[in-house]
Image (spheres, rainbow, N blue to C red):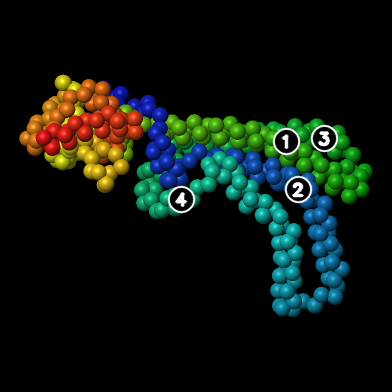
Amino acid sequence: MADDQQEKTEQATAKRREDFRKKGQVAQSREVHTAALMTAMVLLWFFYAPLFWKNLQSLVGGLMARAGAFEVTPLSVVDLMIYIMGRVGLLLAPVLLLVLVVGFLSSIAQIGFLFTTKPLEPDFSKLDPIKGAARFVSKRSLVELVKSLAKVLLLGFIAYKTVAAEFADGLLLVDMPPAETVGYLGRVAFMVLLKSSGVLILLALLDFMFVRWELEQKMKMTKQEQKEEFKETEGDPHVKGRIRSIQAQMARKRMMAEVPKADVVITNPTHFSVAIRYKRGEMDAPVVVAKGADDVAMKIREIAREHKVPLVENKPVARALMKVELDHPIPEEMFKAVAEILAYVYSLKKQ
């Protein structure tokens, strides 16, 4: 039995999932980031490459044209470097912006919006060399190594097959002008990147499914853990039962204290007792101040007799009034029946 309780056979509860999320332990695949970034870079390069090369050619041409008249001094070299870095920064700005946006969106797509500083908190247990060595040779590190090797081999094979298919045309490069050679190499490189992106998307999908499954396994709970969590969130059932019992006793005492103030207690012979109070000019309708069945009904009658509160037997009315909440006025359809009973009680008091 103890072994069974130690096995994580139960699915994670909502609280456990939330606890994992607060700690930053979520199903997030690095392959999704890589695939999204590669695909976005390929698409950006397809549209941005002509403008990039045009501006880069203009920058290099301008520098070459002024090279003869350039006076080399410490200040002029610094100014030149600032100028070049500024122009190159502008050329690379779309690429850098794309990296930030794609990285952010790929995280949002996987785990939604999450902000937590828990992973940044120092954990001195990670400085233990023995535990560090254990993590280095763990099953997790072995899986990551196999995944990385498989990805590199697969991408290398895709690149090789793409380039090999262009080998015959590549032999003609020696007779091509430099501009056509560069264009041809650019097209081949673009095909390699495009096919690699497709492979990375497939690998990212598989890896994301694996990461989700792995996290689900990690979040599973033992039966004992579920019991402990239930006690933390809902409270110990025995304690809650005791609290409910005490609350019921207190409510019953308060209810019994209202019986002497009632105008009448309506009963059926054995089961129900309902105490009614009505103050003309202060209440819109009679109010149920106490009610109960069996032993509680007998106790209400006992208190009523002690304080000379009239008891009136009326089975249909008693049964109907048992459905009315305490300290609530009686329903409108009961006005006539209760009014007749109250009139009878008032006539007895006058006599």
The amino acid sitting under disc 4 is Thr
Give the secondary structure at mark 3: loop
Q: Residues at badges 2 and 3 in contact (C-beta under 8 Å)?
A: no
Residue occupying the point 71% across, 74% down: 78
Towards the viewer: 227 or 63? 227
Q: CA distance from mark 1 to mark 4?
A: 36 Å
Q: Earlier in the sequence, mark 1 or mark 2?
A: 2
Q: Residues at badges 1 and 4 in contact (C-beta under 8 Å)?
A: no
Name the residue that disc number 1 marks. 195
- On the rendered image, what quadrant is the N terminus found in? top left
Q: Is residue 273 left or right of residue 323?
A: left
Name the residue that disc number 3 marks. 166
Q: Earlier in the sequence, mark 1 or mark 4?
A: 4
Q: Residues at badges 1 and 2 in contact (C-beta under 8 Å)?
A: no
Q: Is 10 above or below relative to 188?
A: above
Q: Earlier in the sequence, mark 4 or mark 2?
A: 2
Give the secondary structure at mark 1: helix
> Residue 107 location in percent, x, y?
57, 45
Looking at the image, can residue 249 be seen?
no
> Residue 33 location in percent, x, y?
60, 43
Q: Residues within 10 Å of mark 1 (few under 14, many from 20)?
A: some
Q: Residues at badges 1 and 3 in contact (C-beta under 8 Å)?
A: no
Looking at the image, can residue 344 be seen?
yes
Q: Residue furthest left?
A: 306
Q: Nearer the viewer, mark 1 or mark 2?
A: 2
Name the residue that disc number 2 marks. 45
Q: Which mark is residue 116?
A: 4
The amino acid sitting under disc 2 is Trp
